[in-house]
Image (cartoon, helix red, strand yellow):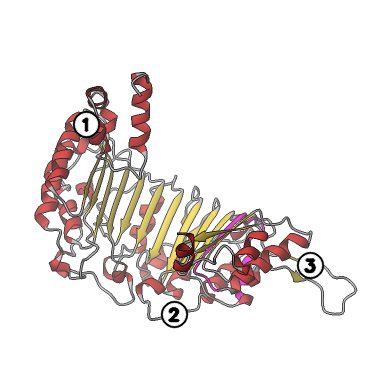
Amino acid sequence: MDCIPNEILSHIFQLIFLDPEESPSCSFTISQVCVRWRDLAISSPSLWTRIAFTFPIGNFQFSYASLALERSGSKPLSLLVDCRDPEWDWEEDGHSFRNESMEAILETLLPHAARWKSVDLLTDTWAPIHIFLRLTRSLDNNPHLESLSLSRCNAYFAARGQVFQPISLRDPIPLFGGAVAPKLREVALVGVHLDWVHSSLRNLTSLAFKYHALDVLPSLCQFAAMLESSPQLENLSIIGWGPRLDPESLSTVTSIVLPSLTKLSFGFIDMAYSTQLLSLFQLPSLRELGLEDVDRIVSPLETQDSHHILEWLYTSQPTARASFAFPDGVPVNPIPLQSVLKLELQSIHSSKGIFSSFFQCFPNLVSLSCLEVSDEVLEALEPYPMDAVGSSSARVGCRCPALRELYCQDSNAELLVRLVTSRSIIGSVAPLQTVTLEYSRSSRPRYDSDQYIRLENTGIQVLGTSSSSEASDSE
């Protein structure tokens, strides 16, 4: 190690520091090894640009933050504040992370706000978010800020009929007092509402809008204006609810055109609301689509069939409803499924027939991920006879003919083996190249089990934790 030149050693330190799995305080650890390493670390400002406060907040974190703020010089800063307590009892007023701690953190960081590059704030309750919005509303100089993520990690408020709590802190606050952050491109608002009129959210490339209570949603006009002020928006995530869809707004906003959007993640609770919202979008550049039944998260005791939204999606395609068209004769196609290359389904349940019609709309789909979906998905992807029984010909069709990658979580192993095998022998489509089955809710099969051997012989990669009996056998 002593023979390594300073330039190479400094580069090694940089690689360690950039690893997201490494604690930001690793730079402090490096500086304590020896005099040479200490001098090298202190003379490298970029090694001190990541600062994290994580629960439980202790004096060392404040000491390290002060040290990092000094040693990082004028470099832009990446900040993480994670106030979440794994043992929180869901009482808003009884959280172990106190308001005074949040105020102390911001008192440390605010003098350096002009250097903020990314800010990630995760909380269980609303109070820390409210303190952040209140104490940063006077900031008018955010020249380096590129990414902002504010998350109140409580999906419960997105459930049907739920309203924002605590009511005393519901009044919205404009982000940074309405000041423009010229480099801000990525924003995530998870259970966090703003003053939608006066917050300057524009020129974004990525927006996540998740788990909001019904009574703090923006109007459709406000939501459309926010999206349309970001013509280069490439990634949009709407989980739970988007804007309020009142009759007056719907008469004013008839479409939301997002010309650059390539990825849409959509989590639905109410089917009628979701299809009405989706019908407003025009997404000509869409290449990645994610669908999730969020109702299973916010209302776990209730189950719903996803067929309404799947049916709407495939009947909205031009081939299914040629009568709906623009005046120039070009078919209206809000969500162009035929252009989608990557699809992720999560907690989606329906019949084989519905899935079959749905997958018929994906001729160019290359990658499919299925997380906690019903087994009918696999059945719908199997080859099927195209000719009537008794016909002289025996043509075989296959939905999603371009499919090459399939990832399944907790799916039926025998069905998956049958699917992979049947698609590999029909000849009309190329075999699946990469197939993965992950066991997340149960133990994966033992290596010596017939099921594991069948999966392996079919070329399916198996992931997951082994059973306790297998672990015992290996000891």
The residue range painted magenta reads: 353-374
Q: Amino acid at mark 2?
A: Thr
Where residue 473 sits: x, y (%)? 48, 64
Residue 27 visible in this rendered orientation of the protein: yes
Q: CA distance from mark 1 to mark 2?
A: 55 Å
Q: Amino acid at mark 3?
A: Val
Residue assigned mark 3? 396
Name the N-terminal-most of marks 1 and 2: 1
Q: Find out whether residue 295 is within the magenta segment.
A: no
Please identify, in this view, whether the residue under mark 1 or under mark 2 is nearer the observer: 1
Q: Amino acid at mark 1?
A: Gln
Helix or strand or loop: what does disc 1 sit on? loop
Residue assigned mark 2? 303
Mark 3 and mark 2 residues within 8 Å of each other at the beta carbon: no
Front residue of 423/138: it is 423
Residue for point 45% across, 59% down: 475
In the displayed structure, would residue 16 be above or below residue 398? above
Residue assigned mark 1? 32
- Check the picture and name the quadrant holding the N terminus: top left
Q: Quadrant of residue 141?
A: top left
Q: Find out whether residue 369 is within the magenta segment.
A: yes
Residue for point 83% across, 79% down: 389
Q: Residues within 10 Å of mark 1 (few under 14, many from 20)?
A: some
